[in-house]
Amino acid sequence: MNTTRFLLGGIAGGIAFFLLGYLFYGTLFSDFFSQNAGSASGVARNMDQFVWWALVLGNLLFGFLLSYVAIKAHIKTFGAGLVAGAILGVLFAASFDFTSYGTSNIMTMKGVWVDILILGVIAAISGAVVGLVRGMIGKE
């Protein structure tokens, strides 16, 4: 495995994932998810209570997951990264959201479906960034 490609792809993907997460979850769909919260209370933190190191680490780790898959699948283009990211994002979100829905009262079923769609879009764009970065960095 080319460590430089893995690290640069993972960092770029993680940054994209973080910024897109803020755009989609923190801005565009913030009210939607507030309205589609389940009966559990006190679950979401206010932004001033975020544990930033954990949030950043989680986003970077997803970027590294995308980068690892890109290496194993020989992805070095925007388009291939977009498709792989979308598939990983939808499967990851669906797995987590349906398990959470089945075991907790965090969000409504409508919220589950929208979260799966949003995470699929975010992961697709982040995967495209990983593919693009990997394609720009020398030969393996």
Image (cartoon, rainbow, N blue to C red):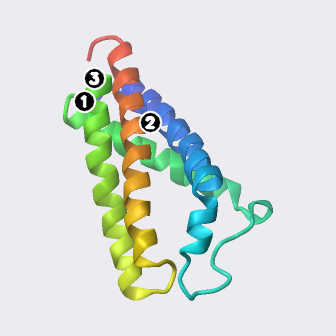
The percent position of residue 33, horizontal first and vertical second, equals 56, 67
Upstream in the sequence, badge 2 or badge 1?
2
Label 1 sits on a secondary structure element that is helix
Question: For residue 102, which quarter of the picture?
Answer: bottom left
State which mark lies toward you, 1 or 3: 1
Q: Name the residue carrying label 3.
A: 76
- Camera-side mark, 2 or 1: 1
> Looking at the picture, how far across and down is residue 117, in whole percent?
38, 55
Residue 82, percent from left and from top: 31, 34
Q: Which residue is mark 2?
A: 10
Dot 3 falls on a residue whose secondary structure is loop
Disc on the earlier residue, 2 or 3: 2
Name the amino acid type tagged 3.
Lys
Residue at 57%, 57% (x, y): give it.
29
The Cα atoms of the two marked residues, 1 and 3, are separated by 7 Å
The residue that disc 1 covers is 80
Please state the total of marks drawn on the protein image: 3
* Label 2 to label 3: alpha-carbon separation: 13 Å
- Which quarter of the rendered picture does the N terminus lie within? top left
* Label at residue 29: none
